[in-house]
Amino acid sequence: MSDKSNKTIDIVHAGLARRHRKERWFRRMGVAALSVGILFLLFLFVTIFGNGWSAFQHAQVRLQIELSTSVLGSPETTSNDELRRADYGRLIRDALLDYFPEVDSRRERRAVSGLVSSGAVYQLRDMVVSRPQLIGEVIDVWLVADDEVDMLVKGYIDRTLDESERRISNEELGWIDKLVADGRLDLRLNRTFLVSGDSRDPEMAGILGAATGSLLALVVTMVLAFPIGVAAAVYLEEFAPRSRLTDLIEVNINNLAAVPSIVFGLLGLAVLINFVGMPRSAPVVGGVVLALMTLPTIIIASRASLQSVPPSIREAALGMGASRTQAVTHHVLPLAMPGVLTGAILGMARALGETAPLLMIGMVAFVVDIPGGFSDPSTALPVQIFLWADSPERAFVEKTSAAIMVLLVFLLLMNLLAVYLRRKFERRW
Amino acid sequence: MADKKIEFSHHISRQFDQELEEVRTNVLKMGGLVEQQLDLAMKALTQGDSDLGEQVARDDYKVNSLEVAIDEECSRILAKRSPTASDLRFVVTVIKTITDLERIGDEAEKIGYLAAGLAMAKQPKNRYREIRNLGSHVKQMVHSSLNAFARLDADEAFEVAKRDVEVDEHYESILRQLITFMMEDPRTIRPLLSVMWVARALERIGDHAKNICEYVIYLAHGKDVRHIGMQSHASLAEVERKLDELD
Amino acid sequence: MADKKIEFSHHISRQFDQELEEVRTNVLKMGGLVEQQLDLAMKALTQGDSDLGEQVARDDYKVNSLEVAIDEECSRILAKRSPTASDLRFVVTVIKTITDLERIGDEAEKIGYLAAGLAMAKQPKNRYREIRNLGSHVKQMVHSSLNAFARLDADEAFEVAKRDVEVDEHYESILRQLITFMMEDPRTIRPLLSVMWVARALERIGDHAKNICEYVIYLAHGKDVRHIGMQSHASLAEVERKLDELD
Amino acid sequence: MAGTVHDMMDESSAATEAVPDERPGVMAVEEEKGFQTVGQVEVESPRISVRNCNVWYADKQAIFDVSLDIAANEVIAMIGPSGCGKSTFLRCLNRMNDTIEICRVSGQILLDGEDIQGKDVDVVPLRARVGMVFQKPNPFPKSIYDNVAYGPKIHGLCRNKTELDEMVHQSLVKAGLWEEVKDRLDQPGTGLSGGQQQRLCIARAIAVDPEVILMDEPCSALDPIATARIEDLIDELRHKYTICIVTHSMQQAARVSQRTAYFHLGRLIEVDQTDQIFTNPAHKLTEDYITGRFG
Amino acid sequence: MAGTVHDMMDESSAATEAVPDERPGVMAVEEEKGFQTVGQVEVESPRISVRNCNVWYADKQAIFDVSLDIAANEVIAMIGPSGCGKSTFLRCLNRMNDTIEICRVSGQILLDGEDIQGKDVDVVPLRARVGMVFQKPNPFPKSIYDNVAYGPKIHGLCRNKTELDEMVHQSLVKAGLWEEVKDRLDQPGTGLSGGQQQRLCIARAIAVDPEVILMDEPCSALDPIATARIEDLIDELRHKYTICIVTHSMQQAARVSQRTAYFHLGRLIEVDQTDQIFTNPAHKLTEDYITGRFG
Amino acid sequence: MQTGTLLIVLATLAALTYVGGRARALALVAGNPRQLYSLPVHYGVLAALWASLPAVALLLGWTGLEDRIVMGKVWTELPAQYQAMTSDERDLARAELLNVAAGVAPSSDPAITDGAARLVEMKARSKQLRGLLALAVGLLGAAIGIMVLRPNLSARTRVETVFRFFLMACASIAILTTVGIVLSVLFEALRFFQSVPITEFLFGLEWSPQTAIRADQVGSSGSFGAVPLFVGTLLISLIAMLVAVPIGLMSAIYLSEYAAPGVRSVAKPLLEVLAGIPTVVYGFFAALTVAPMLREWGSVLGLDVASESALAAGLVMGVMIIPFISSLSDDVINAVPQAMRDGAFALGATQSETVRNVVIPAALPGIVGGVLLGMSRAVGETMIVVMAAGLAANLTLNPLESVTTITVQIVTLLVGDQEFDSPKTLAAFALGLMLFVVTLILNIIALRIVRRYREIYE
Ligand SMILES: Nc1ncnc2c1ncn2[C@@H]1O[C@H](COP(=O)(O)OP(=O)(O)OP(=O)(O)O)[C@@H](O)[C@H]1O
Ligand SMILES: Nc1ncnc2c1ncn2[C@@H]1O[C@H](COP(=O)(O)OP(=O)(O)OP(=O)(O)O)[C@@H](O)[C@H]1O
Ligand SMILES: [Mg+2]
Ligand SMILES: [Mg+2]
Ligand SMILES: O=P([O-])([O-])[O-]
């Protein structure tokens, strides 16, 4: 016997080297695969952050502006309305021309005023309207520069190129350099981006409108999807008798979870807008569509969570004489709640990042105003990203990246919340 | 309930089968040894062979060591297998049976010893005939009781047990006869007393054989029929009915 | 190994404790009953009280039924608890002990029966003294052996067991004496034979007491000291050493 | 009784042959007529009385025509090979089988003389009267106190917190757990050891003051020491409750019960005093099973 | 030996008092010096020889200084209360503990005289020599044939299909399963009954022709009938293999093994012939455990 | 009364009824809860349900019918010429009426102005009436709810029945959604197939819907052969799967079988981050970074890579699907019981042998299911392809060229101004239907496989 076993072990030893070699290769493949995934992630983040970081600053020009009473009228006599309608552009133009006395041709004058964003007018107006006592004084203000100037200052425009190939002429370059040398042109914190709505001018475009739209839509989604989803999951998992109907519902839910999101958009378009007659481009419609889309996710996550509550707990409760409802509400659901919440949050996160269905229901419209209610026209963060990504201006590239950063921050926060919940309530049986 | 059959095989654990079988074999081996001892002792007595008598007395240790061995085996089975029902009854029966077999061995030893002593005395031909008869009767009982044990045959055991009464009567008559002889000739008192001890030993052997039979009945039916005076009943079924009534 | 202590309590299952305790109590009760029977039988003999003798003979059924009851109890424990180690040895010991106690009871019954017969005969004052002595010696042995059982005291058991030799010698001397009397006056043969049976019974009781002691030693130490002639050894430890050498 | 056994013999040996090798799922479908359980099916003044109970899982019959009485204050053990229907039968007694959709029960099951089988019988009070302890200790993942207090709470047994406290205390004492947990009633029940958890489950069952406690292999997840403790506890509880226990361990059945029922392929083969079953069973199948001669 | 026992007594009673109530996790940390196992630790020409083995899980010591020889062709059973380290010790013998990251083993473990503990020892041939069977039957979700053939295949033990077929056949025969499965070798192993699955796992272990087979509670998931079959099988396998079996059931240890080792709180208290342990153990702790007097 | 206020009032009523019902139940049994059939809470809830459910039902019904009834009423009061309007005109007039009523725009038509005033007034009155009625019903319900309480009333059963109905209704929403999807795409798709034969749609090799809206080509319906779209979709999905499956699977294996806890605790969340990134971000990335990069590399190698190549979209989509595949595989690999691995290890298998021979085969059905789900995801993925793939429907299998997909076409056809009867817009719905059907089939197969696999160990 020992004879034979020796033989066996010899055979085993003979094959060992080959087997260990295979083992090492397999392992390396795993490392490689994982690295590819993670490298890509890093690449993506680096690219996006590299692109988007600069959007949180933008070039501003410091001008000495005389708030002349000739343009604005005296503070005592002009009504608020008149003040709003005053020609602030002229004030800015004058200030610029004061600064560049050498400029005289019409073309040059136009070019000089082009250094400052067209939105600067509103900036100035808001300032004056809020503090009318300034009228008549000469103030030193930072005004948003034009996006091309911005790009130049940030170094996105290649000065060495031939003049014809860039959008900033040599003349303008000179002015800009002068401003920079005087400390009158600088990169400063971009508040506009965080507090205003969309705009055709990249330098005046902001994310707040989209963010508010997303928030409103998400509120609708959550209010609808969470209770309904949990209730449906509880019904299917704990109450439903096995019947054709429940089978059908089950198949349906699993299927809905994997239906492409754009199809939900079609549903929203056809049913909610064209049939029910809800307003286009409204967060409420977006919310409903997203709710329908996340519902299966929440139901499936909740069911998984309910399933992971050991049957012994149910049996224990039923064995104690609890009714089914009591068993569910007292034991099963509270135990499953962390999972349910995690599922809900992840579903919300997905809804937050979802774009396609919103395109279908018109939330892709160009909306300047920040929405004030559920039925106001609005857009949403991812759609805003889509819109900006499509815009030709170079400056929108960094805006897009910045918007992505904002979106990602939200998503990460939600994911962290989910992870936190899971950790906090994690229970082992 | 009369024909419930007990088998000591077909356990899922073949080892258990083997162990039980070994115990049974050992008991029968011990029984065989005891029978042989008894046989030799009676031969020593009737043939006046003092050497043979002494040999029987010497060989008793074999019976004793078999008893100890079987006892240990039974303890081991009880500890390892925790037998139940018929298996348990079997083990308990064996524990009791070997005690009785050992006593039979002791009695045989005693007979052998007495026979060795009597070999010196004059051989009274006709006298030993009665003892011989008693001896063969008792030997028959021992043999049958071992048979009943081997075949777990409660009915045979019952029949054997009933025959103990005959042995007792036989013994009584021998006793009376011996007393008469003693009174007739006081010088014979000493050897006759030896003969009386032999008869007494045989009577005891009969009792032990009866005990074994009672154990066999217990083993087969789970009813303890000891101490109830079986001789007055015609059949085992009758006895059981009576026991059931008592319950 | 000499002072390993056995306790029959502290099982996790209190019920098991109770059951074992009950068995022990019952054995001691049976022992007490047997002692009492023996006592009464001896009293009947020495006081020539034939009624008392008959009563002893009649009461033997009590001992018998206790034996059956304890036996059943033991079977039940074996089946239900599958005891191991000391618990198992205890149960096995009990099964064997009660067999011996029952035999002691039987012998007491016999003495009672004989005493009833002897009550008719003339009371030979001095003769019974020897028997009385033997009787009290044997009673002492039975008592001590039960004590040893109750306290699971192997050393006491060993001491008691050794004393059986004395009983045997005593019996032998009574026997010789009786034979002398018989030969002197053959008319006394019949009653003297009865006395002889009594002496014989007492000797057997001594043997049974010795058996019980051997079981107690087995129980306490897990060593079977039967059939090895303990009298030649000074102490239990010596015996055990010898046994260990044999292994 | 002798006659009964006699009648049984032929049938039983036939059944033995039909026993499939180790496959619990396979069940002989032969519909023996006139099958009769050996032993004392009936008792005087039964607490639970089952008559001609049949159970099907979908089309598969799991229990065949079982009749059995359970007396008050006794421990009855149910033994038998795997898949013979012990658990199924036990779960009929408090209608826990209702939770299995495909399960269908026929026959009469009386608890203190009332039929519990009707469609309109409310299972909630029924289960309050017939408590259950499961194979794996399954305390709620709440505090020890809440575990025990749950039953009284849902059944509205207490007027106030003091009463509830007292009830919890009593139950824990009865379950022999009070001493071990009295200082940590607010700690989770899942933090106890296996044996303690199982005793907690028993305390929880006791707290609603049931009449009958069903236990389905309550010790199979425990080590020998914890098992011995539970067995001891069962013996004490017997004085107040009626207990039905399913167990795979014959030793355990022998130790804790007064009566034992042997199931085989969905039939109740024999039921009798435990001593009787374990020293001298009447039916050959029982004997074969308890002596390990199956198959 | 008497002397040893004598010396042990005091320690052991101290240890008894330290035994915590039913809580397997709690381990007395007292580092008794001069602790010595009672009984025959050494055997002649041992197959496995363990000396001063200590095992830690992270900072918690699970095995204290255990020395034990295992002879060829014997069945040695390891018993002891839950959490006493039986499984841990067993898994040291084929380094299955390697799969638990926090587990650290010290001491000398020799298999046929070769140390198996070194960092550079290749576990692959080691495990081919020391097979293992687990508590829950774990056949691969493949056909019965593939289950058994897996070991020979990965180790390249067979030159061709015919040899492999023969090897599978032989292993199944040895495991006593051939008759039951010969007509359905291509059906999944998971479709067998629990007991058959466990025998399949044994066949699978046998197929690589190991020298030692370790079994960790191989019957605890099985019913009594399947258990009896496995026990019988173990007894047969003993003639060819050395078998170490961990079991919670003392009865089982008594039935299948020639020697028995009793563990308590990570220490090997006593090891001796099984007959001896179960009729007359030398150490009080052993006696208390096997007679059910724990705690 | 405003809806919000009304709801708050009703809620308060229900709360009060709950307290009342509870108290009454206890009073009925003199404070001994043991004599009650159900818990006091149940009686309270039952009473509260009586108080709230009928009122809420009334509210819902009223609100649903209100607009129609009021409008009908106002309409009938309008001058005769309005009654004689065609349905199109009527719709217009109604819209105007509503606009005026909402104060959005004044109307030139005095009848409309009047009507609008009437509308506003009637609505206000209806609101008042509604509030009063709801309150009355609520109070009545509360009274009934409290009166019906009896100690032996099984309040629990009733409350639970209501609860169950609520749950059931919620569960049915899934069906409604599916029905909604099917209906919304089906009708439009059918209309589309009336103008374009289904065979042409399914087997036509040319796709150029843009031509259809040119006014000078009325009657010409362009070409709606969807094969190039199918092929494009398939091509991109295939590229995606080629990237995702090996990487995802190997990552999952590495993470679950090999990686040290430290590595795992870092790498796993990182992969999950990959899963959480919105597709629009991937799209942006594909269009802005990956596509130009590929183009550059292509030119270095002398290959002509389209700026919107299928490869770019496919690669990025593949990356998007990696975490999907890896986490699904991870799940199924983890679901393979440790006992399986122990079994293999104990036989002396190396780690990779264990994985390849035991773990993967055991998990294979689950993995295949996961891959199919990933595939369906790829087919239905929209934003990446909208941003990174082309619009031109090239029928090609060359990954370096630009292709378009079903989803891209749906988006381009539907975003912007729509004329709902042009085949162009309707084509989007037909494509949507196709997409739905294809992913449905993929999903059903995948779910079947996954589910069957699950049953093995449970
Ligand atoms: N939920 C179920 N669905 C279908 N069949 C079932 C179900 N539960 C049990 N069965 C079948 O009913 C029979 C009896 O099962 P039961 O669980 O009562 O057996 P048991 O005696 O408790 O076995 P065990 O000792 O293994 O627990 C078995 O054949 C089993 O396969
Ligand atoms: N993976 C692990 N990590 C940490 N501690 C462990 C681990 N496995 C076992 N232990 C601890 O080591 C000790 C011995 O455990 P082991 O599993 O060997 O006990 P056992 O005797 O096999 O118990 P059981 O009878 O319950 O199987 C226990 O205290 C246990 O808590
Ligand atoms: Mg069961
Ligand atoms: Mg273990
Ligand atoms: O010991 P006895 O055989 O004479 O009873």
Image (tube, coloured by chain):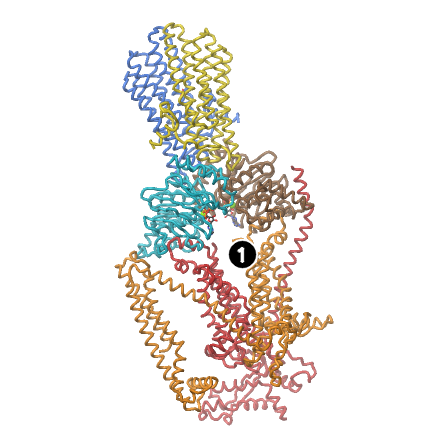
Chain colours: A red, B yellow, C blue, D cyan, E brown, F orange
- Asked if residue D226 can be seen in this view, the reply is no
Crowdedness of circle 1 by 10 Å Cα count: few (<14), some, many (20+)? Answer: some
| D272 lies above or below F85 | above
Question: As rendered, which of F395 and E137 lies closer to the eye?
Answer: F395
Residue E236 in the figure: left or right of residue C16: right
Residue E202 in the figure: left or right of residue A277: right
Label 1, secondary structure: give it: helix
Residue C41 in the figure: left or right of residue B28: left
Q: Position of residue F10 (x, y in %)?
A: 34, 72
Q: Position of residue E193 (x, y in %)?
A: 53, 46
Q: Amino acid at mark 1?
A: Arg
Residue A346 in the figure: left or right of residue A391: left
- Asked if residue C245 can be seen in this view, the reply is yes
Image quadrant occupied by the C terminus of chain E? top left
Q: Give the farthest residue toward the right.
A: F302
Q: Position of residue E46 (x, y in %)?
A: 60, 36
Residue drawn where x is 69% and y is 47% of the image: A15
Q: Position of residue E206 (x, y in %)?
A: 61, 42
Kindly indicate the quadrant of the structure image that contains residue A169. Answer: bottom right
| F224 lies above or below E95 | below
Q: Give the farthest residue toward the left.
A: F30
Kindly indicate the quadrant of the structure image that contains residue F132. Answer: bottom left
Q: Give the farthest residue toward the bottom.
A: A70
Q: Which chain is home to disc 1?
A: F
Q: Which residue is mark 1?
A: F454
Question: As rendered, which of F196 and F387 lies closer to the eye?
Answer: F196
